[in-house]
Amino acid sequence: MPRDQAAAFLRALAGANPAPETELLYRDPFTLLVAVVLSAQATDAAVNRCTPALFAAAPTPAAMAALGAEGIGPHIRRIGLWQGKARNVAALAQQLMEQHGGEVPRDRAALEALPGVGRKTANVVLNVAFGEATMAVDTHIFRLGNRTGLAPGKTPREVEDMLVRRCPPELLRDAHHWLILHGRYVCKARAPECWRCVAATQCNYRDKVPAPPR
């Protein structure tokens, strides 16, 4: 997909959703960080069912570290890989206390050094909490980038780099949200709902579905 076509694709999504936001529930950079860590291989809806009680019990890194993995676990049993996530959240809270004064760092390397935090999670935190123009590539965006021709790549990093190159700078911060929401609700994995797609004319997917199945 040429750069001008990619820009038109993104502008179509922007026109339909001018002020996109994450669907994860959070209060501040710390609770956002925890929510994103918990969302790995789990839906935002599932995480949102668990985090209100968790954040009520442990709203700060100090409280979360004090709660520990054994205290965190019961709050998140309904999401996938909860035991490992409980350990990671307890450990990252402790590391925030020991190395960052209880604050979430605004630095990619420092974020990625935290337990359970990879490039995608760091990108989300930098984007949502700190307003930086980053592109976090999850399974929805990876699929959409390849399916539409917007940003084909064999790895999430390849898709991320292509999106950053092709996205108009003024759209980059919000592009993550437009793409993830579009992949979640319209350009779905098994059955893309192309008849609802506001960017269908800019999409290079060959097997478009022009109408709902009967």
Image (tube, helix red, strand yellow):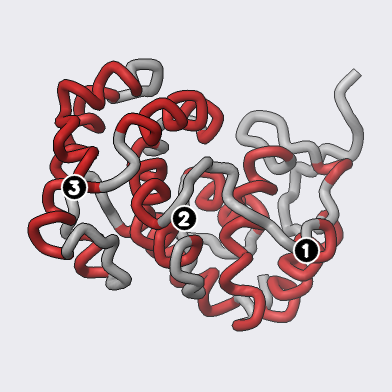
Q: Foreground mark, 3 or 2?
A: 3
Name the residue type under label 1: Pro
Name the residue type under label 2: Val
Mark before the other along the chain sequence, 3 or 1 = 1
Q: Foreground mark, 1 or 2?
A: 1
* Disc 3: which residue: 92
The total number of labels drawn is 3
Mark before the other along the chain sequence, 3 or 2 = 3
* Residue 47 x %, y %: 46, 30
* Residue 108 x %, y %: 28, 69
Whether residue 159 can be seen here = no
Q: Is residue 205 above or below residue 13?
A: above
Name the residue type under label 3: Leu
Mark 3 secondary-structure assignment = helix
* Disc 2: which residue: 137
Q: Is residue 161 left or right of residue 54?
A: right
Query: What's the mark number on residue 18?
Result: 1
* Residue 79 x %, y %: 39, 22
Nearest the viewer among 66 and 199 is 66
| For the residues bearing labels 1 and 2, Cβ distance under 8 angstroms | no
Q: Is residue 134 left or right of residue 90?
A: right
Which residue lies at the image location 22% right of the left edge and 30% below the top edge? 86
Mark 2 secondary-structure assignment = loop
Mark before the other along the chain sequence, 1 or 2 = 1
